[in-house]
Image (spheres, rainbow, N blue to C red):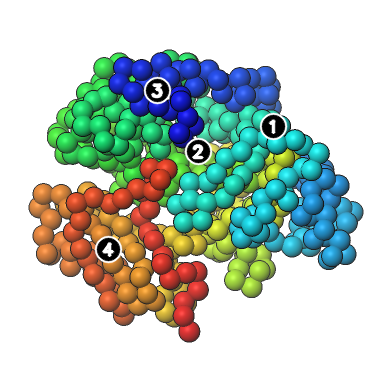
Amino acid sequence: MPGSWLQKLTTAPGLGSVAATVQAWRVSRRRYGRVYEALVPEIERRSRMSRDEMRAHCDERLAALVSHAYAHVPHYREAWRRAGLSPQDVRSIDDLARLPILSREEVRAAPQRLLDERLPPSALIRLSTSGSTGSPLTLFRTPEAEATSYAFFEARCRRPAGMQFGRLPYVMIGGQLVAPVTRERPPFWVYNYAWKQLYLSSYHLSERFLPHYLDQMRRRPYHAILGYPSSVYTVARHLLERGEPPIPMRCTITSSETLFEHQREAIERAFGCKVFDQYGAGELCVFAAQCEQGSMHLSPDYGLVEVLGDDGRPCPAGQTGELVCTSLINFGQVFLRYRLGDRGAIDENRCVCGSALPVLSRLEGRVDEVLRTRDGRVIGRLDPVFKSVEHVREAQIIQEEDDRFVVRVVPAPGYDAATAETIRRNLADRVGDARIDVISVDRIERTRAGKFRAVINRVGATPNP
């Protein structure tokens, strides 16, 4: 709702909670209506399927999607005809590799060519990605697809974590602009009565304002926190640094950014509960959520995920590669074999939790959020650089050139030259012979959506020769 009259009301003192509640009522029927109510128990039922049963279900959905794309989506019809392909060539997951890969550049250049040509614009929901990589996309989804995505979040994430939407009050720390960034005093939040949601601004998380956040969170019992890992961690860290008692929660659910282990530990201490991380994409082509055992379970009935190496071939189980995804829930804008831009690995072993759903055993974030060394190595998990390093509020690693890195650090009391040298040495242990500058900054800028980027690669996915 950026720029709308409703957003102006939301950011107006005294009217924010009213406007937030009105906005929630407007979208509730679309997100949480009959489609949602019917699908939540159905998705829970499919969670108990065997792998063979889930495979048969996904094969059926894939065959229907391919037939639909050939008949009604211009991009695929034309591309497949040029390649001599027809829907009969792709009847199961085993046949997926026959289809060409869809690039992000193709989506950006002509998003309308991925649409069901029979649907008028009014039948679709239009939105844009946050553009954290500097290249936002225009996306479309049917109302049914949006309701389906929320049903998956409820059935495979919220309820397993111990939360049920609409039952008890909860805290949300996200990227919606619920208070002007220039506001100098509370409130930095709104209360959405429709969803029993305290929505905290992620744009005012400074040492000056954080005491107000903690006071507001203690005013009534909340049973869960949802939000960006960096935002929830900032609140948790402030509580711990002040030596205050925990604010008890049933669970914390994080999403939209990489969750680092030191963040998880601080959040669990501050709120006395487990953290459940969730992974997804605005293209509605992949969904994964952590179980009680900490495994990140994929939902193949939401989106099929392939892991491909640099040569375009499938990676062996457990080996990291680029994620290529196929949405099985959005027939309005079709994403078939879409190069998402993230890297990860899939473990074929069954999780000890008992679920037959596959496990995303490694997730390294976007291609431009990993480091690539001059010798071609890809380094994704960089939280060990800061493990056991004290007196750092937050930090960001930037790759400026093949062999030059900058670490921006927001220091806490006690930070000194020795701490900076430890960080430099830890990163050097991973990237090898390179120039590494560790600099102190007052704050690290968020994206337009309020997200924190722990790693920025300004060189690109492939090192220079």
Q: How many marks?
A: 4
How far across and down, in percent of the image, does residue 336 sit?
A: 71, 52
How far across and down, in percent of the image, does residue 346 sit?
A: 58, 55
- Kindly identify the amino acid type of the residue bearing the numbered disc 1: Ser
Given this view, does label 1 or label 4 mark the residue nearer the observer? 1
Give the secondary structure at mark 3.
Answer: helix
In whole angstroms, how far apart are the C-alphas of marks 1 and 2?
Answer: 38 Å
Given this view, does label 1 or label 2 mark the residue nearer the observer? 1
Q: Earlier in the sequence, mark 4 or mark 3?
A: 3
Q: Earlier in the sequence, mark 1 or mark 2?
A: 1
- Kindly identify the amino acid type of the residue bearing the numbered disc 2: Cys
How far across and down, in percent of the image, does residue 15 sit?
A: 36, 17
Write down the residue under mark 4: 407
Disc number placed over residue 9 in the picture, else none: 3
- Which residue is located at x 42 percent, y 79 percent? 374
Toward the viewer: 202 or 36? 202
- Kindly identify the amino acid type of the residue bearing the numbered disc 4: Val
In whole angstroms, how far apart are the C-alphas of marks 1 and 4?
Answer: 46 Å
Given this view, does label 4 or label 3 mark the residue nearer the observer? 3
Q: Is residue 48 visible?
A: no
In whole angstroms, how far apart are the C-alphas of marks 4 and 3?
Answer: 39 Å
Write down the residue under mark 2: 291
In whole angstroms, how far apart are the C-alphas of marks 2 and 3?
Answer: 39 Å
412 relative to 89 in the view: left or right: left
- Which residue is located at x 34 percent, y 64 percent? 398
Crowding around mark 4 (Cα neighbors within 10 Å: few <14, some 14 to 19, many 20+) is: many
- Kindly identify the amino acid type of the residue bearing the numbered disc 3: Leu
Where is 335 relative to 249, above or below?
A: below
Q: Are marks 4 and 3 in contact (CB under 8 Å)?
A: no
